[in-house]
Image: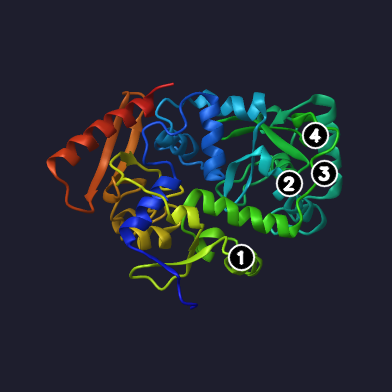
Amino acid sequence: MPKATFSVSQTRACYLWIAAQKLDATEPFGAGPQATQQAIEQLGYVQIDTINVIERCHHHILQTRIPQYRRSDLTQLQSADKSIFEYWTHALSYVPISALPFFLPAMKGHRVGTSRWFGSVTSEEIKAMLGRLRTEGPLSIRDIADDELVSKNHPWASRKPSKRVLEAMFFQGLVAISVRQGMVKTYDLFARHFGWSAPPKPATARQTTAYLLDRALRSQALVSLDSICHLNAPAKKAVRELIDSRVRRKLLLPVRIEGSAVEHWAEPQTLEQLIEPPSLVHILSPFDPLVIQRKRLKLFFDYEHVFEAYVPAAKRRFGYFALPVLVGDRIVAAIDFKTDRVAGKLLIQNWTDIAPMGAEEKTAIDLALERFERFQLGD
C-alpha cells in the first residue's frame, strides 16, 4: 500500500462520517419536501425495502435526519415535483433526478443485452404493454385484470405475467414509477411521466466514474474503494484510476485510519474540518447508509451488525429486525422492534446491549424511543 500522507484516529474517522451523513445536527435540512430533497441529494440515494414490521426503511432513513419528516413529502417529490426517481443503485432506491444521466447507460444496457432476471420477457410483450400504457394511461399491477394467472416461481413473484413485463421495462428505462403506495407501484411511460420530448443525454463512462467517487466523498467523507463501489465491483478499476489521478493533482489525500490497513482517501478540506464530538441519539435502520456497509461499520465503530430476518429464529442474536442505536459516536445497543398498528404500540421484542451506558445516555435513549414510536404510528 502506498505510504499514507495523513493519519486519523478511529474516533475522528467516526466524527467525519457522522458529519457527512448529517447525523450530528438536530435538523440539518429543516423540514418539508425541500428538506427531503436535500437529504436524498446529500446521501446520493435512499434505499427502498419491502419489510414492514416497522415503517419501511426509506421513510425511516429520512426521518432519522428530518425530525419533522412526513411521508407525503416523499410522495410530492416523486409524483408531483418529479425531482427524484426510483432505480437500482446497490438496491432499489430513490435517486435525485440530477443523477439520471449516470443511470441512462445502464438502462440502455438492459435494452440491448439479455437480463438474467427478465430474459424470458419478449419484445412482443413489451410492445403490447407500451401500447396499453399509451392508450390507458399509468397502470399498476392491480389495474391489470385480464392476465392469465401463472404459478409463482419465488415468494416475491406475482401470478400476473404483466408484473414481470413492467419490471423489465422499468430496468430498461421505458417506464418510470410515477406513484408508490406502500409496495404497490404505478408505472407510466418514462418520457410522459417527466414531460420530456426526449430524456437527458447519457453520461459518459468517465463522467459516471466521477459521479460515483464524488457521491461517496460527499456522503462518507473518508472513502475506500469498497465503500465507493459497494456491490459494484466492475467499477473499481476505473474508480481507482480516477483516485490516483486526483491524488497526483492533490485533490485527494491518502488517509490511514489508525489500526487499519485499508486504503482510504479524503478531500483536503474534509481533513481540515473542526468537528465537535457528536452527541445525538439515533435509532438507525439496518438499511441506513451508516449501517448497510457492514465491513465499514465494523472498521469505524467496532460493531458488527447482522441482519437476521433470514436467519432461523433459534440462531438469532439480535432479533428478526434489530436496529442499531447510535449515541454520539458509539453504537450502544441493538433493539428488535415490531409495530402493533392495531393496538397503537411500538413493541420491543429483544434488546441487546453492545456497549456500557450511563444514566444520561439511557434517559436520552428513552426519549429517542418515544419520538420513534410517534413516528411509527403517526402521519
What is the CA distance from the residue labelled 2 to the residue labelled 1? Answer: 27 Å
- The residue drawn where x is 31% and y is 49% is 319
Q: Of the residues tagged 3 and 4, which is closer to the observer?
A: 4
Query: Where residue 165 appears, x then y in whole percent?
Result: 74, 44
How would you rate the neighbour count of disc 1 (Cα within 10 Å): few for under 14, some for 14-19, many for 20 or more?
Answer: few
- The residue drawn where x is 23% and y is 45% is 351
- Looking at the rendered structure, which numbered label has been put on residue 191? 4
Q: Quadrant of residue 304?
A: bottom left
Query: Where residue 242 appears, x then y in whole percent?
Result: 64, 65
Which residue was labeled with disc 2?
A: 101
For mark 1, give the secondary structure. loop
For mark 4, give the secondary structure. helix
The amino acid marked with disc number 2 is Pro
Which residue was labeled with disc 3?
A: 125
The amino acid marked with disc number 4 is Ala
Of mark 3 and mark 4, the one earlier in the sequence is 3
Depth check: give the residue in front, 28 or 135.
Answer: 28
Is residue 259 rendered to the left or right of residue 162? left
What is the CA distance from the residue labelled 1 to the residue labelled 4? Answer: 40 Å
Depth check: give the residue in front, 59 or 242.
Answer: 242
Depth check: give the residue in front, 365 or 247.
Answer: 247
Is residue 256 rendered to the left or right of residue 135? left
Which residue was labeled with disc 1?
A: 249
Q: Quadrant of residue 295?
A: bottom left
How would you rate the neighbour count of disc 3 (Cα within 10 Å): few for under 14, some for 14-19, many for 20 or more?
Answer: some
How would you rate the neighbour count of disc 4 (Cα within 10 Å): few for under 14, some for 14-19, many for 20 or more?
Answer: some
Number of numbered discs: 4
For mark 2, give the secondary structure. helix
Q: Is residue 206 above or below residue 38?
A: below
The amino acid marked with disc number 3 is Glu
